[in-house]
Amino acid sequence: MAVFLKRRSLWVGFLAVLVPLLVLLWLQYRWLVQLDQASAIAQKATLKNYLEAVVSDVETTYRQNAERVLNLSPNYFTQDRLEKAAYHFKKKGVEGVKRLFVVSFADEADGDLLYFEPSCASFSPPSRSPEVQAVWLATAPWRALVHKGVPVERVRLTIDERDMDYRIVLNPITDDSSKVVGLAGMILDEEHFRRSVLPAAIKKSLPKFFSGNSQGEPVVSVEDGLGEIAYATGKADKDNGRLRETEAVRPFSFVFTDWKIGLISRHTTPAVVARRNFLVNIALSAVLGTVLLSGVVLALRTASRAMKLSQMKNDFVSNVSHELRTPLASIRVFGEFLRLGRVDSPEKAREYGDYIETESRRLTQLINNILDFASIESGRKSYRFERSDVSEVVCETLKTFEIRLRQSGFRILLERAEVPLPPARIDAGAVAQSLCNLLDNAVKYSGEKKDITVTLRRDGDSIVIAVKDQGIGIPRDEQKKIFDRFHRVSTGLVHDVKGSGLGLSIVSHIVEAHRGTVTVASRPGEGSTFSIHLPIEQADSRAAAPAASPAAFEAPAGAPIRGLRS
């Protein structure tokens, strides 16, 4: 099996190197063949991305200004405080706007149109003019919605450009019930757009796409709604006021949507195209080189993990052999004493029988761990859940450890709640096995300190079984790994203790099958506490949790297991 794993790891590493190498050669050939086509495609994509950036910048400028200035509180309309709106307009201020206005639908107002007067920071009704007619036309749909009493769930800026001389941005103001109580609007200044906004947006994006080289920058032109050149960054041949052979064209998307921006490149030399493709190939080679290196590392890592797993399995066989030999030797010795008649009293015979029973239980536990692990790995492990008293399961399990603890000089202190714990749906045998594994670990790693505390209490909707020792402890970086199969802590004191490396892995599986959790709290030199949390039956989960306090553990006479009394 180990040889197979090593061979598979080598094949994975070999393919991880070979496949990227073939891909690299194929892509290099493809890039060389398509060099001319790629250059043209890349250049055109750059031009389109540049136009998209300019259009986006223009939209952002007007949208941010409109949201900043036109975002009025509905209280200005519902509480007849339009002077606050006038103060807001004066304070915010905005360039590129011919006129600011509001339309009020609140209280007795019936869609009154009021112009903002900057000189006196107030509103006044406008006189009839083409501009006013354009505003009335833009606000007509909103007036209809208000008269019908239709709520507006989603409020956003709207644009009206039916009259190109008066391009209007509207922001509907709604109250808490989503009803429109007013409109705030602005009439845009086309001349400001032509002289300030366009040049700023065009010049802002040029260095990002053309490296700030004025000789390599394209000629950018903007046509208005009538098809006339409204702005251009350089001289170009014109035919009836239009630039010829424009390489890319893009309309504006938010305001001035009838205007278009286009450009043509001044010149693109073969050297520039070749250099661009060369850099692309270098970058691609670097990426594929990284992939090759990653493949080699992956292959080495896989081989290392395979050998580590093989070593862990070898250690497992060695440790299990030692674990099996110890109880078998004890059973054999005490069995020979009984067979040869070296027992001089019934009490001694009973004592030897207790030792044989304890060691056989220990042997059974180890074999059960191995068999359960095999069932878990194959997915055939099953549990039989029944309504059980967890306290009884814990007490019976502690009794099975009596002789072994007596041999080793250990003492168990059992702490349990004064009020009986509610029952839980568990597999009593599996829970007992989990507790046995935790106690076995506590005995192995306690060293010279012979006190082990078992706590049985309720925590919310869970019953907690905690096993605390005063042994050598577990480092923090190892605490998440100890529930993995075959894993054993690598520190010297722990590593010297023989074990199969399966006990905690089986505990974790059993507790997860019960929809519970198992946790560990430990510090080196201060001992460890393993806690099993088992859910209480749903019918009992609403009961109040009693406070936990020490209680006596019932044990046979003469046992070294002593309880704590409150």
Image (cartoon, grey):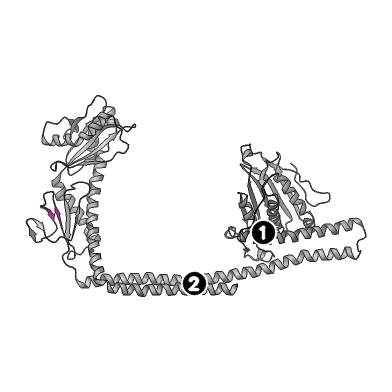
Asked if residue 260 is among those painted magenta in the image, a careful observer would answer no
Foreground residue, 148 or 342? Answer: 148
Q: Is residue 262 visible?
A: yes
Q: Is residue 474 visible?
A: no
Looking at the image, which residue sits at the far left? 240
**Which residue corresponds to the image point at 67% horizontal and 59% vertical from the top-left?**
372
Q: In this rendering, would 194 be left or right of 497?
A: left
Residue 404 appears in which quarter of the rendering?
bottom right
Q: Which residue reaches farthest right?
A: 344
Numbered range of the magenta stretch = 213-234
- Indicate the position of residue 357 as horizontal and vertical percent values: 80, 58
Say whether residue 147 is left or right of residue 245: right
The image position of residue 454, as x and y in percent, is 70, 49
Residue at the location (22% across, 35% down)?
Answer: 141
Please tell me in which quadrant of the rendered image residue 160 appears.
top left
Instruction: Check disc 1: other Cα within 10 Å, few if <14, some if 14-19, many if 20+.
Output: many
Tell me which label, 2 or 1, sits earlier in the chain.
2
Quadrant location of the C terminus in the rendered image: top right
**Amino acid type shown at disc 2:** Val
Q: Which mark is residue 372?
A: 1
Q: Which residue is mark 2?
A: 12
